[in-house]
Every structure is written in structure tokens, then in C-alpha cells.
Amino acid sequence: MNTKGNCRTAAWASLIIAVCMAPLTAVAKPLKIGGTGAAIGTMQVLAEEYRQVDPSFALTIIAGLGSGGGIKAAAAGALDFALSGRPLKAQEQAEDLRAHDYGRTPFVIVTNKEGVENLSLLQLERIIGSSSPTWEDGAPVRLVLRPVTDADTELLGAFSPGVKQALADAHKRGGMVRAITDQESAEESERLPGSLGTSTVALLRSEKRALRVVNIDGVAPTPQNFASGVYPHGKTMIIVTKGPPNEATQKFLDFIASEKGRLVLVRLGHLVPSTH
């Protein structure tokens, strides 16, 4: 996998990403957060909106942790809160880790191939399972896989038993593109001609990615179709704290749950929890 020379890759790969702060404003101690890349863009947009309420607010984002790494860091007290695209496991709950759901977003198939709007599940199975897949015009398909143990691999395998088996076969082949983080997956899907990868609506919108979302069996993976169950594939996004949130985290959580915060989440492709 070659991402050298890509400015955006360098930015995401940097160990610490500090959200910009308004000039000449007294800045409170930044909240230190990290976890799934699917949530990082959303948190940055929410932070920008929240600074209109509290100009001193700032985040320090530790990149590249993933859900599991972020949760472990929160459990160790290294983060104010973690970002996760999966529920807490039983052993994590036993460590006094607490999940704060803030929304659900569709999990989607993406490509940079012009003219590709729809794939049937059978076509998806054949593309993933083939050692030399091609598009209908004969151009090669460049698969962008996630690690075998990644939650996104499990989510993609849930599309159908055939897709699950095709993924298992694909991971056994040599020379495959494997993206470790959500941002790497999006970048490779943008970069490789004829790409086919996975992402979420929230990541695509918050980071303004130049990728096409593919319909599956004629069903568009919109938040509306996800809400109705017509499109069943998605992620529940949570913020994880060790015990009760600290004061600064609680204020940010309150903003996320406010009308303004909820409008931001909806705009970025989330279904937000009921306020009742």
C-alpha cells in the first residue's frame, strides 16, 4: 500500500491532531480523545460548533487507535473519552467503562469508479471472491480490505453468507490492499483506480470524501432507508468514558445531545437517539 506524498494521509497519520482554536481566546485544557476513525471527522465538526458556545473548548485527537485501542486507552485513564463503532464487550463493561450512544450511521460500499451505482449481492460476492475481479467494462476492481479481526470486516461479512465466505477467501490471497484505519481505507479507495471498499455515511460526509456510495440490490444506503430497516447495515457510534464523565466531557456530551448538536449529527448522516 503506497500513501506517500498524500498530504491528507500525513495529516491523519500524525500522532496528535489538535483541533484549531479561536485566536486570542483563553483555552481550557483540551479533552484528549481517540478511537474509531469513523467518528473523528464528526467530533471535529461538533467541536467547531461547540466552540461557538464555549470558545475555550478544544480537543486533542490521538489518531490510529481504532475502537479497541481507544477503549483500552480510556480504561487506562489515558483518554478523557474513547470513540467506538461497536458496543462494549462484557469484560469492558466490568472495568466500569460506560457507553454513551450518540447516533447510528449506515455502513456502506464505496468506489471511485464512474458509472457504478448499484451492485447485487451476487455481484458483490463474485467481486470479493475472485482472484482477478473486473467491472462490467473489463477494468480491474481494486479491493480495499480491512484486517480480518476488524469490525468492518465483520459488518461486510454480514451482508450475506456468500460475502462472508468470499471475504475469508480474499484474505488468504497475497497482494491484497489492506487498510488498517478508517482513514486509510477511504484514502486507498479514493486513490486506486476502480476501487471497491467500505466506509460509513458519517465519515464520508464529515471528511468530504470523493467517493461514490453503491446501492445494494437497488437499495440506497441512506439514513432514511437505514432508519426504516430497508437497508440494514450500519454502525452504532458511542462515546466511552471510564466511570462517570468528567465535567468537561459531560458538557460536550450535553452539547451533542442538544438540538444544535443533534442537527449536526443528522446533517452528517446519523440517526440520533430519541430524547424521550
Image (cartoon, grey):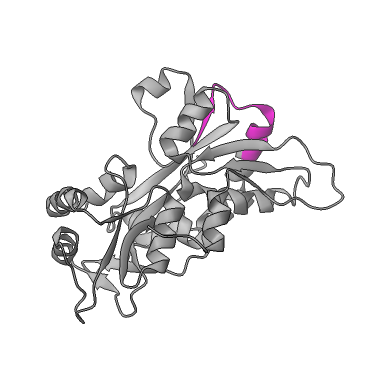
Q: Residue at x 57, y 48 (%)?
A: 14
Give the percent coordinates (x, y) of residue 104. 42, 48
Q: Residue at x 48, y 34 (%)?
A: 70
Position above or below: 185 against 255: below
Residue 251 in the magenta stretch? The answer is yes
Q: Residue at x 37, y 20 (%)?
A: 91
Q: Residue 116: name its quadrant.
A: bottom left
Magenta part of the protein: which range? Answer: 239-252
Position above or below: 220 against 36: below
Give the percent coordinates (x, y) of residue 89. 35, 27
Give the percent coordinates (x, y) of residue 210. 46, 70
Report whether 87 appears left or right of 61. left
Report whether 202 appears left or right of 59. left
Where's the N terminus, which quadrant?
A: bottom left
Q: Is residue 200 visible?
A: no
Give the percent coordinates (x, y) of residue 77. 57, 23
